[in-house]
Amino acid sequence: MTEQLRNDLDTFAKEHGYSGRSEVIREACQSLLEEYQETEYQDQRVLATVTAVFGYDEPEIERRMMDIRHEFEAPIRSNSHNCLEENAGCVETFVIEAAYHDALQFIGTVRGADESVSVEYTVVPIDVMDPQRSEQ
């Protein structure tokens, strides 16, 4: 864990009434585990959008994103890389179509690219978008 992350956790704990960084980490771990528990999407195909934000001119992270594109080539429907104004950072966006479990694996892989990568995502069951599909 980097010194900056430790400092950020300590500040967060103080500002939000936690007893310390270990309590923040425990709660974050519980939230992450709950997020990956079985849901109503468990046996469905889903469409997921995954957005990763990271620092500008980070060749190792960009190389890892390229590796992820190759590793998950089949479910990726769209991918874009954009640099923010004045070298403020980069945004990598993926749209994937996959079984729910595979989508979670993809999201976990992007999250694990580097500790400095911030990841947000949405998951929508494909049946919601195509009612005829759910009738079959």
Image (cartoon, rainbow, N blue to C red):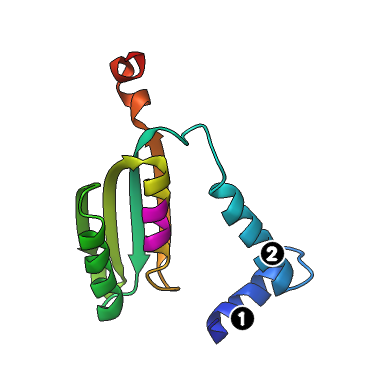
Q: Is residue 84 visible?
A: no
Amino acid, disc 2 = Arg
Q: Quadrant of residue 24?
A: bottom right
| Horizontal arrangement in the rendering, residue 19 relative to residue 38 (left or right) | right
The residue lying at 28 percent from left, 79 percent from top is: 60
The residue lying at 33 percent from left, 46 percent from top is: 49
Label 2 SS: helix
Closest to the camera, between mark 2 and mark 1, is: 2
Q: Is residue 81 above or below residue 77?
A: below
The residue lying at 34 percent from left, 55 percent from top is: 51
Q: Is residue 19 visible?
A: yes
Amino acid, disc 1 = Asn
Q: Where is residue 35? Give x, y as percent.
A: 55, 48
| Horizontal arrangement in the rendering, residue 133 relative to residue 34 (left or right) | left
Q: Quadrant of the C terminus?
A: top left
- Residue 26 shows which numbered tag? 2
Q: Residues within 10 Å of mark 2 (few under 14, many from 20)?
A: few
- Residue 91 shows which numbered tag? none
* Nearer-N-terminus badge (2/1): 1
Along the viewing direction, whichever of 9 and 110 lies nearer the viewer: 110
Q: Is residue 36 magenta?
A: no
Q: How many marks?
A: 2
Q: Which residues are magenta?
A: 105-110
**Location of mark 1 (residue):** 7
Along the viewing direction, whichever of 54 and 88 lies nearer the viewer: 54
Callout 2 touching callout 1 (CB < 8 Å) = no
Label 1 SS: helix
